[in-house]
């Protein structure tokens, strides 16, 4: 079971870069790492997904070291609207092979 | 705007009522999911449908009954619910069955907020 561990909460200020790290020591060979963002009263939204090294899109970057036991979501120059809960998920190779949400990180961006 | 549409957005029902939650997607996705989310908690997987067949039931009580009439629609029938079933119910879809075949990311609706009196 590829369980994930993230910080419960983080604070930042507008314009700063935010890095949220997720630990997944038991990640399986075929698992991908996926990050979602969730605002209050909305469903989670896909941000980025990766398997190894670095992935970048218009919203964020994802850094994955060679051992894949952790990953870091990097949000450049955050704004107030980035205040949300961020979830890190890995493919679950248990019987159901499904994705399981961990506790998530509650990011608060202040002016 | 989300590509997965859930109705109703809010639902209040008594413990003896029967109601249904509906979910629709037109992205051609063949996997659909129901999640339950309590306040300040992560979503918890309830059911997975893959190619219109029930693939996963995460030991959900029988008072929740899923149905997939076709590849675009997913229903969750509710009967004799308990107050602790009050939560946000999220529907999601993905191109393949996430984590099993393709690791495709899931697309979520904005949920139905359910309150049981």
Image (cartoon, coloured by chain):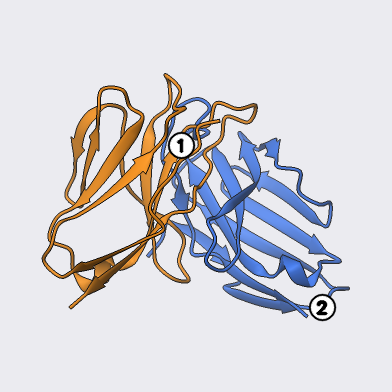
What residue is shown at x 44% (from left), y 27% (from top)? A27
Q: Colour of chain A?
A: orange
Residue marked by disc 2: B14
Q: Locate residue A37 relative to residue A73 in the image: left or right.
A: right
Chain name for mark 2: B
Packing grade of label 2 (10 A; few <14, some 14-19, many >=20) is some
Rendered-image quadrant of the N terminus of chain B: bottom left
**Rendered location of residue A63, percent (x, y):** 22, 36
Residue marked by disc 1: B95
Relative to B49, residue A77 above or below: below
**Rendered location of residue A48, percent (x, y):** 29, 43
For this rendering, which residue is in front, B113 or A31?
A31
Instruction: Give the label on residue B56, or none.
Output: none
Q: Looking at the rendering, which quadrant does residue A9 occupy?
A: bottom left
Q: Locate residue A77 relative to residue B61 in the image: left or right.
A: left
**Rendered location of residue B39, percent (x, y):** 56, 69
For mark 1, give the secondary structure.
Answer: loop
Chain name for mark 1: B
Q: Locate residue A86 relative to residue B48 in the image: left or right.
A: left
What residue is shown at x 59% (from left), y 68% (from top)? B112
Q: CA distance from mark 1 to mark 2?
A: 36 Å
Q: Looking at the rendering, which quadrant does residue A80 occupy?
A: bottom left
Packing grade of label 1 (10 A; few <14, some 14-19, many >=20) is some
What residue is shown at x 60% (from left), y 51% (from top)? B44
Q: Colour of chain B?
A: blue
**Rendered location of residue A45, percent (x, y):** 38, 55
For this rendering, which residue is in front, B21 or A92?
A92
Select label 1 or label 2 by which is in front.
Answer: 2
For mark 2, give the secondary structure.
Answer: loop
Same subunit, labels 1 and 2: the answer reads yes
């Amino acid at each position: 079971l590829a369980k994930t561990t993230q910080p419960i909460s983080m604070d930042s200020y507008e314009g700063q870069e935010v890095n949220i790290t997720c630990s997944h020591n038991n990640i399986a060979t075929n698992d991908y790492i996926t990050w979602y963002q969730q605002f209050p009263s909305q469903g989670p939204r896909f941000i980025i997904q990766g398997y190894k090294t670095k992935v970048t899109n218009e919203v964020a970057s994802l850094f994955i070291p060679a051992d894949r036991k952790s990953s870091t979501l990097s949000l450049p120059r955050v704004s107030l609207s980035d205040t949300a809960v961020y979830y890190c998920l890995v493919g679950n190779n248990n019987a159901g092979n499904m994705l399981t949400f961990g506790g998530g990180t509650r990011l608060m961006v202040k002016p | 705007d989300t590509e997965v549409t859930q109705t109703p957005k809010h639902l209040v029902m008594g413990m003896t009522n029967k109601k249904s939650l509906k979910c629709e997607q037109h992205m051609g996705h063949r996997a659909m999911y129901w999640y339950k989310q309590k306040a300040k908690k992560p979503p918890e997987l309830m059911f997975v449908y893959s190619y219109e067949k029930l693939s996963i039931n995460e030991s959900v009580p029988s008072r929740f009954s899923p149905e997939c009439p076709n590849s675009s629609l997913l229903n969750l029938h509710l009967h004799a619910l308990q107050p602790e079933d009050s939560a946000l119910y999220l529907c999601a879809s993905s191109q393949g069955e996430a984590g099993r075949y393709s690791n495709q990311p899931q697309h979520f609706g904005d949920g139905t907020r359910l309150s049981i009196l």
